Amino acid sequence: MDWTFWTGLWDAGLWWLLLLVQVAGFAMASHVVSSDRSTQGTVAWGVSLVLAPLVAVPLYLFFGRNRLDTYVAARRRVDRQFARDHAPEKREPDKATEARERNLLHWKLVENLAEVPFSAGNGVRLYFAGLAFFDELRRSIEKAESYLLFQFFIFRDDEIGRSFIELLKERAREGVKVCFLVDAIGSRQLSRRVYRELRKAGVETGVFLPGRTLRGRLRLNFRNHRKVVVIDGKEAWLGGNNVGLEYTGRDPAFGPWRDTHLRVRGPVVKALQLAFVEDWYWVNRRMPPVRWDATRRQPEGVGALCLATGPVDLEDSCTLAHVHMINRARYRLWIHSPYFVPSDEIIVALQLATMRGVDVRILLPSTADKKLVWLCSFYYSSLPQLRGVRFFRYKKGFFHSKMLLLDEELASVGTINFDNRSFRINFEVTLLMMDDEIIRQCHEQMLRDFADAVEDPPDPLAQQKFPLRLAARGARLLSPLL
């Protein structure tokens, strides 16, 4: 045999491989077209798989799936046990709350999406600075008597993370049941040594991976973006802060860090606990030690609903809930989000709101932590349909808050960004709140934030140099993944 034989064999094999990849591209494109993903995502994936299969086929294996069937099955089992162990709260509105109860009729759609009702009798405290949040969270953890559910998207083994590692170990040694759950992608830099260290002290650990099989583990597109802490079933925390030095504003790479977090007590804690239990059961296939009868109605009387969303929802829950909120706005809709990559439905809803005369403001960061998403925000904030929306760029450090203020009716704080990933791909959670005092606090903080920002011109992309304009238009082609 001479060299010609081997080169001919190589050429033949290469052509067969190319043919196989092209056929796989057509097959995957057919799957995309028949799936229930957005038009935007369908077009982007379908065209890529047909025209550039060598690149798109591997990407689709990792990022293309938009549903986790195994999580659906695990959720059903958890929800059945929850229904057995938990008696729903009876609504007994008095005269002082009758108006608010009538107002809740407008929010029946969101209650149906969340599969839990608005509950009265909650106490909420807002935190607008990372240091204050971390200090208060440590104090609450120190008071835990029975169990601790601790979940973050990003957990770093730095000065801040190490302080929580030592605290969780100490509480576990003292007999408190501690469950520690992080996302595999968000906390990918967390070493195995940390997990061993926690387990040795008695802390149960879990890593949220998209699946247990090789096929499941290729689904890296699914991420658990929730940040939830539940203490003894009585108190819960959620918001935008992860655990790391940058969230205190002391990381020189980011500088001052603006975020929003909250602590809640009352009946709504049960819904936040349920979201954690579903995640934990899917990861570890066992129930954590929780109580459902520990919550008590609080004198503050905040009406609250926990909206936990993700790619396993039967409906497009996050998108539908936010379209409903935008459509409810009569005169004011102010939004905090570090990322802005909206779907077609959100664009239309925002456009209609401005045409109704609603004061729509969206506050974004002026610096980038994710370059592609930052570029996309320039493209979408320059859309002609959104010329009535006022966009602001925060200048006093990095901006990571996720907050929404709707008229004098509702405020929401949680983990949801205004992008396709949060609305359709990630597991997220946010708290919707109806309370005059909470709305006042959110309004005052938003005024301070807008004062620390600069408003964009009507077409911000046109003000940029050609390379950035081209990059922004190219980045938006990846918007279904961002």
Image (cartoon, grey):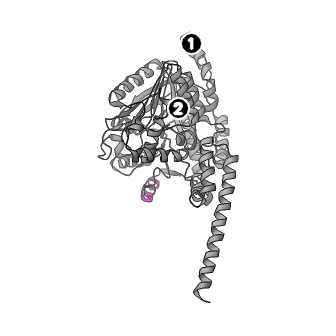
Residue labelled with disc 2: 269
Locate the N terminus and report the quarter of the image it occupies. bottom right
Q: Residue at x 62, y 51 (%)?
A: 47
Name the front one of labels 2 and 1.
Answer: 1
Label 2 secondary element: helix
Residue 160: image location, x then y, percent: 35, 46
- Is residue 189 covered in magenta? yes
Q: Is residue 252 left or right of residue 375?
A: left
Which segment is the magenta one? Answer: 176-199
Residue 126: image location, x then y, percent: 41, 29
Q: Where is residue 313, by image quadrant?
A: top right
Mark 2 vs mark 1: which is more N-terminal?
1
Q: Which mark is residue 99?
A: 1
Three-letter code for the amino acid on which mark 2 is drawn: Val
Q: Which is nearer the eye, 345 or 268?
A: 345
Q: Residue at x 63, y 50 (%)?
A: 46
Residue 51 vertical placement versus 467 (above, below): below
Residue 72 vertical placement versus 209 (above, below): above
- Is residue 266 covered in magenta? no
